[in-house]
Amino acid sequence: SDPLRTVFPYTDYLHLPVLFTPGFRRVLFVGMGGGTAPGRFHHDYPQTTIEVVEIDPEVVATARTLFALPDDPRLPVHVTDGRLWLRRSTARYDVIILDAYLIDTIPFHLATREFYRESAARLRPGGAVASNVIGAVRGPESRLFRAIYKTFRSVFPRVYVFPVGGGAPESLRNIILVGTGDPPLTRSEIVSRAAAAEQSGRIRIEGFSQDAATLLDGPIETRDVPILTDDYAPTDALIAPVR
């Protein structure tokens, strides 16, 4: 099978932070998954170094053997905890992509205000942090997403929300957050950038401008959810739907 083929639609949305960081040259993935997302970045952006931090060596081995993740100096893989890596590394990145959350469990230390601050501190000027979250925007299964969004907002001056595939806000799905410190962009500016990048071939994701157009408009209710901190991050309780 083609290792570059999109299997999970959310991995196409992980290219959205590129719209906020023109001229990016260094990307960090915290969490590997099957390796298809970093592998696609490695293929599509040949002038860019793609680093991956993955805590589980078995995940890395599977990505190499089953999903043809390249063994290339331009795609180094570090087998360690993502937060420890950010604390110990002196590297700076144009884009940091957090893809370490599952539908039923979250390593809470990778979802706190302190962790997002540590991520922001590793950005180059004009950089962006993106996070893949599984949840809903509204309704009984939305509390975890809304808490992560509130926590993101406490760190990044601008936060953009892209529910994968659009649809009803109560639907459980992947949601991509993009946090930046740059002046805000409007929906039309973001979609125009996506269309131009797609047309020029700079981004090779089919339908990428439609992905960008799923940008969520309007406020997100956060008064009933906490900012997640190292001292208080009840992620397991927030995953459970309200009955």
Image (cartoon, rainbow, N blue to C red):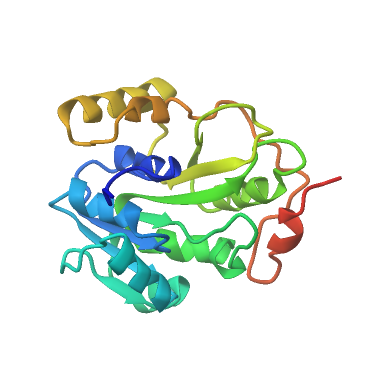
Residue 87 seen? no
Q: Position of residue 79 (x, y in %)?
A: 37, 77
Q: Give the quadrant of the C terminus.
A: top right
Residue 50 seen? yes
Residue for point 63% across, 70% down: 230
Q: Position of residue 82 (x, y in %)?
A: 44, 71
The residue positioned farthest toward the right in the image shown? 243
In the rendered view, tell whether residue 68 sits above or below residue 80.
above
Residue for point 27% across, 47% down: 4
Where residue 229 sits, quadrant-wise, is bottom right
Q: Report whether 38 appears left or right of 213.
A: left
The residue positioned farthest toward the front in the image shown? 1
Between 53 and 190, the one nearer to me in the picture: 53
The residue positioned farthest toward the left in the image shown? 47
Q: Position of residue 193 (x, y in %)?
A: 29, 28
Between 233 and 227, the one nearer to me in the picture: 233
Q: Report whether 92 appears left or right of 110.
A: left
Between 118 and 13, the one nearer to me in the picture: 13
Q: Position of residue 125 (x, y in %)?
A: 29, 52
In the rendered view, tell whether residue 140 sits above or below residue 85.
above
In the rendered view, tell whether residue 213 sits above or below residue 81.
above
Residue for point 40% across, 55% down: 97
Where residue 211 sits, quadrant-wise, is top left
Q: Report whether 196 appears left or right of 32.
A: left
In the rendered view, tell whether residue 225 sits above or below residue 219.
below
* Count of numbered tags: 0
Residue for point 23% across, 30% down: 197
